[in-house]
Image (cartoon, grey):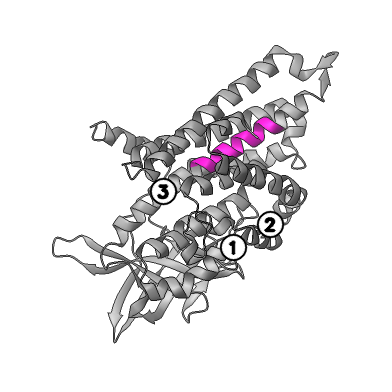
Amino acid sequence: MNSALMELSDEHQVLAKTVEEFANRVIAPVAAKHDRDHSFPYDVIKKMGAMGLFGLPFPEDVGGMGGDFLSLCLAIEELARIDQSVAVTLEASVGLASMPIFRYGTDEQKAKYLPALVSGTSIGAFGLTEPDGGSDASGLRTTAKLENGEWVINGSKTFITNSGTTMTSLVLVAAITASKADGTKEISTIIVENGTPGFTVDPAYYKVGWHASDTHPLSFNNVRVPESNLLGERGRGYANLLHALAEGRIAIAALAVGAAQGCIDESLRYAKERKAFGKLIGEHQSIAFKIAEMQARTHVARLAYYHAAALLAAGKDFKTQASIAKLVASDAAMDNARAATQIFGGYGFMDDFAVARHYRDSKILEIGEGTSEVQKMLIARSLGLNA
């Protein structure tokens, strides 16, 4: 348990400790195998659901745990310390699928979809990114046209997390529902259930990291869903997804902090066991200073996401702080992974060691939920600079 948790409430500390113990006991023994086999950890995810992790930030009247967004972030941090793939499965399902339905859904949509999502018996995905879109979320090409009381969806999505498991129940699809007079696009969000005719989950990617996380491209060929599957107000899809992405940056920052902390944990253990030149390597100043730097950058990143989460909880503008947290934390994760691999020497280059997995996994943290360059652009704009 990290010392920064001393500043949290008793409830938050108990939650973090509980998830930490779960990660050590349940996830750690199987993480390397799932990474090696590129297999989705169904047993782990189902146990997380039974613990209530997928319901952490939701009120009890929808089956949730009555916690807050910081509770979710703390759980994500502790999971990512051991396995980033498991952590991002939780983050994507809760932040990008369940939360938009809870926030923007009709009573009927909430009653139909939230019980399974919040309990973790099913998971969800958000279909935003497209082959030609990348960080430019406004560059959507997928369309949804209203015909005889049904949305007819055509297009494709790429890099969609949680989209192809047997537990996946739905994908929220961002689509162009009209073209405005000024030439801009009306973007809305449509709920598409798995198994809908014309909706194809294409073969999974072979990725550099996050091997136990499910990621697929998606295709939509005249996919028809009821008009009532519109999520939120028509034309508000882009604004709503921007809010979801801003919240998601806090959660990804928490994930990155967990990864950075995991590298510290592994490096400390190794530094106290491995000998070189007649003494433990942790007694060499070069190694001790490297770990001290790892600790410093992780502490700063943790405080950054705590601050963003506190602003969100208080109902204040948090978006710039979310970008700062995501930028700083993803840098910390990548820098710590690099440092840990160096500390382990040749062993750090072997996939048998957790630091090698963190080295591969952490790179995507500088890309997903908005690249580091996008975060710098948003921060610069908040300072009045037209970046």
Query: Do the CB atoms of the residues marked 2 and 3 lie less than 8 Å apart?
Result: no
Between the residue at mark 2 and the residue at mark 1, the CA separation in whole angstroms equals 10 Å
Crowd around label 3: few <14 · some 14–19 · many ≥20 (10 Å): many
In this rendering, the count of numbered labels is 3
Work out whether mark 1 precedes mark 3 in sequence or the reverse, and give the earlier one: 1
Q: Which residues are magenta?
A: 253-265
- Which residue does the numbered mark 1 point to in the structure image? 204
Going by the numbered disc 1, the residue's amino acid type is Ala
- For the C terminus, the image quarter is top left
Crowd around label 1: few <14 · some 14–19 · many ≥20 (10 Å): some
SS at mark 1?
A: loop
- Which residue does the numbered mark 2 point to in the structure image? 38
Residue 182 can be seen, yes or no:
yes
- For the N terminus, the image quarter is top right
SS at mark 2?
A: loop
Work out whether mark 2 precedes mark 3 in sequence or the reverse, and give the earlier one: 2
